[in-house]
Image (cartoon, rainbow, N blue to C red):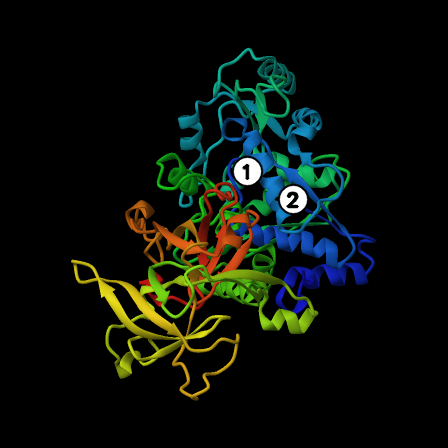
């Protein structure tokens, strides 16, 4: 993984200056996801940024779950997030942390604010509180409970904790300014009543702190030096700072906002991704069509390709939409240089080499790695491919009659070179009752691998092939884009109306026998077809399953 590029990363420049000026001896960053869904490609940018800064400047990066909403959180999400971070190539400093680890401290902070007169228990009903808050054109008005005494607030808050009240009956609010132009500063809620068990603390609590009262204080407790978040939290920074100024916290981190990652033809809202899962549009959070990290992993994306993509787009102070072609380019570049080659015939047409013995069997040893990788590393990876009298080629590689338009196609009287194999010449073909070519008869022209014909009549092209008797039937899952609109969730439209009904097709193919024993998550370049990955969960030796990762080159039809 390359280090963070300061030229393309304003946060890295700030960190560099802070260390040079002696503001900090060591930086401490954190990646603080809420465990209410799987991570998506936008989170990958934040992961690479926070962990990348810690690596570049020899600092620390914490993994902390901001788990303040147990109704929407689960252990499944926690486990998936940890796995995603590790898979991307990062390791957090120390143990996994949870904001719930600090619930006792946060409760004491709330008591401190009540005693200081900067917090009060409000008994407005939720709809009343919303009305009192006002809007961007109208200032709010004070709650009638805003001037409760310290003693009364302490008593009510303790009773809230003891479980004496129903959900929504009371809330603890900060006493700031109901006329503030920043809506987040209009006496925000700090604690609300929720009679629900927490995945980490069990039934210890029936009141839970709001995210805004938790996030900054958790940063302070962990002595985070650079609190990096997406631009949507810019309006929350005054409240973040206000809490730190009004509480006896051990540190006062500084919040920095960067532009979030948005891709065209994609939605990254957890709520919308969950809707796709709940309504069975996809098979789960890790469906290969999903922009989740686990979905991209199952699709065949590599950690390096995602990290390289995040570095390519950089870190700026403004939001923007990135063309998904840039992400695909990062993947294609990585796979082109690293994915082993193999042969798979998707539309098989039998070819019988008539001048070859019926029992002919030959193991052809071929290079699997791309030339660029062999040259760069000196590594070689060879495999054997069985060659027999009967083979399969792709139907599109044969034409009944010669045409200049298809001059590199196989046709009667013309020759073709088999990939890594011999030169053969088509003689005739057989059709079925429907008029479809079902078999091509051919003769073997060369008997030495790689040699040219003795008569100097060169073959017109090279085709991939698989032994008809030793090839293995495999299931190929061919994926297109899940959403067929460039901006599926903009302009108030329902993104669900842009679901591509043809985003998945399942077909059969004949593949080299070695592919049946491929390890799950192994990515191959099926020569002349595309990049395919052995499915992480479904691929077995008895039933090989490969997912289309990406085509060999940009397919502009996918963006139509």
Residue at the spot of label 2: 241
Splitting the image into 4 quarters, where does residue 344 fall? Answer: bottom left
Instruction: Using residue 53 as the reference point, say whether residue 512 is left or right of it.
Output: left
What quarter of the picture does the C terminus occupy? bottom left
Foreground residue among 125 and 526: 526
Q: In the rendered view of the protein, which quadrant contains the N terminus?
A: bottom right
Report how far apart the C-alphas of labels 1 and 2 lie in the structure.
15 Å
Sequence order check, earlier mark of 1 and 2: 1
Q: Which mark is residue 504?
A: none
The vertical placement of 430 against 199, above or below, is: below
Horizontal and vertical percent position of residue 510: 41, 55
Q: Position of residue 474 (x, y in %)?
A: 42, 49
In the depicted view, which residue is nearer to us: 338 or 138? 338
Determine the residue positioned at 68% across, 61% down: 12
Residue drawn at (65%, 25%), measured in percent from left and top?
A: 114
Depth check, mark 1 against mark 2: the one in front is 2
- Residue at numbered disc 1: 177
């Amino acid at each position: 993984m390359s280090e963070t590029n300061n030229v393309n990363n304003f946060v890295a420049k700030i960190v560099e200056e802070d260390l040079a000026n002696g503001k900090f001896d060591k930086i401490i960053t954190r990646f603080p996801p809420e465990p209410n869904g799987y991570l998506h490609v936008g989170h990958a940018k934040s992961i690479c940024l926070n962990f990348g800064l810690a690596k570049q400047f020899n600092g620390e990066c914490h993994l902390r779950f901001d788990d303040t909403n147990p109704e929407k959180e689960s252990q499944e999400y926690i486990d998936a997030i940890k796995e995603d971070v590790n898979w991307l190539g990062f390791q957090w400093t120390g143990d996994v942390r949870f904001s719930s680890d600090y619930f006792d401290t946060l409760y004491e902070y709330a008591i401190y604010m009540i005693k200081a007169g900067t917090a009060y228990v409000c008994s407005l009903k939720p709809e009343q509180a919303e009305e009192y808050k006002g809007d961007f054109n109208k200032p709010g008005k004070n709650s009638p409970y805003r001037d409760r005494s310290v003693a009364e607030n302490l008593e009510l808050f303790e009773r809230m904790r003891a479980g004496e009240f129903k959900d929504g009956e009371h809330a603890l609010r900060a006493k700031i300014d109901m006329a503030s132009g920043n809506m987040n500063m209009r006496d925000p809620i700090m604690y609300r009543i929720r009679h629900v068990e927490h995945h980490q603390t069990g039934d210890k609590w029936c009141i839970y702190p709001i995210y805004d009262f938790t996030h900054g204080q958790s940063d302070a407790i962990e002595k985070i030096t650079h609190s990096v978040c997406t631009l949507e939290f810019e309006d929350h920074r005054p409240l973040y700072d206000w809490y730190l100024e009004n509480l006896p916290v051990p540190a006062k981190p500084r919040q920095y906002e960067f532009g979030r990652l948005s891709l065209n033809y994609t939605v990254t809202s957890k709520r919308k991704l969950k809707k796709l899962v709940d309504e069975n549009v996809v098979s789960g959070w890790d469906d290969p069509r999903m922009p989740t990290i686990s979905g991209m992993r199952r699709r065949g994306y590599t950690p390096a390709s995602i990290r390289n993509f995040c570095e390519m787009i950089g870190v700026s102070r403004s939001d923007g939409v990135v063309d998904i072609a840039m992400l695909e380019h990062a993947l294609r570049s990585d796979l082109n240089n690293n994915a082993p080659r193999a042969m798979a015939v998707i539309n098989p047409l039998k070819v019988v080499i008539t001048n070859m013995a019926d029992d002919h069997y030959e193991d052809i040893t071929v290079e699997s790695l791309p030339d660029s990788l062999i040259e760069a590393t000196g590594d070689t990876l060879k495999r054997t491919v069985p060659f027999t009298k009967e083979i399969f080629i792709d139907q599109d590689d044969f034409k009944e009659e010669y045409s200049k338009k298809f001059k590199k196609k196989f046709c009667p009287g013309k020759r073709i070179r088999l990939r890594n194999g011999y030169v053969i010449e088509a003689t005739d073909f057989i059709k079925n009752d429907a008029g479809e070519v079902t078999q091509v008869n051919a003769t073997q022209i060369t008997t030495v691998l790689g040699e040219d014909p003795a008569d100097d009549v060169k073959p017109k092209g090279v085709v991939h092939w698989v032994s008809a008797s030793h090839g293995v039937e495999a299931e190929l899952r061919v994926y297109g884009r899940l959403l067929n609109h460039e901006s599926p969730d903009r302009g108030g439209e329902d993104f669900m109306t842009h679901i591509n009904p043809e985003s998945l097709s399942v077909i059969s193919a004949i593949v080299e026998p070695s592919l049946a024993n491929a390890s799950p998550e192994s990515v191959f370049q099926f020569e002349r077809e595309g990049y395919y990955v052995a499915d992480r969960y479904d691929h077995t030796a008895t039933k090989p399953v490969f997912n289309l990762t990406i085509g060999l080159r940009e397919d502009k039809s996918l963006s139509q």
